[in-house]
Image: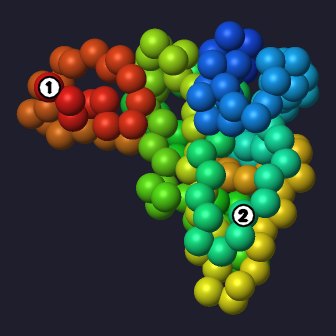
Amino acid sequence: MQRIAKFHKVSKEQFITAMTEEFPQYTKADIEDMYEALELPKRATKGSAGYDFYAPFSFSLAPGITIKVPTGIRAEMEENWVLKLYPRSGLGFKFRLQMNNTVGIIDSDYFYSDNEGHIFVKLTNDSNEGKTVDIPTGTGIVQGIFLEYGITVDDEAEGIRNGGFGSTTKK
């Protein structure tokens, strides 16, 4: 097994900024407590491919409702590797909890973005059975898998990333 990456927390300031923008109902003290309790992603077993990312706070999603969760986590990885994020299979199977972008792609250079490479997940309860999803603090909500990738022989990409969603196609 190749060891090619390391998870880190984003700075406390980055987490406070992100949480305040998305969830103004939380006080700064609440958010600081959440930050201190953040767990780095980890695999559940030796044979697990995915690293579980945990909910930094409790939430409920009724059918059709969406939430954007700042995880407080960033991933430092070698070039030519990508971290792919998928919903936890149990939540998808039981509740049709889905990621809005289907699969999250975390590029190796995202770690160096202005937002410190802060990983967010946007989840929707797509239940067609009327089920509400209740996620307690510390519950695994998505799983990340590191994969190596190749490029074409005539690739000439030289751009430098600065940003997250859609930043690599902005001119």
* x then y, percent, for residue 171: 14, 26
What label does residue 105 carry, if any?
none
* x then y, percent, for residue 127: 64, 79
Q: Secondary structure at mark 2?
A: strand
* x then y, percent, for residue 4: 59, 27
Q: Residue at x 65, y 74 (%)?
A: 63
- The residue wearing badge 1 is 171
Quarter of the image holding residue 158? top left
Q: Residue at x 70, y 19 (%)?
A: 16
Return the disc, 1 or 2, that comes first in the chain's sequence: 2
Q: Secondary structure at mark 1?
A: loop
Instruction: Measure the alpha-carbon separation of dots 1 and 2.
Output: 36 Å
Q: Which residue is nearer to you in this view: 91 or 153?
A: 91
Q: In the drawing, does residue 92 fall left or right of residue 122?
A: right
**Residue 142 visible, this angle:** yes
- The residue wearing badge 2 is 61
Q: Residue at x 68, y 21 (%)?
A: 15
The amino acid beneath tag 1 is: Lys
Q: Is residue 58 above or below residue 151?
A: below
The amino acid beneath tag 2 is: Leu
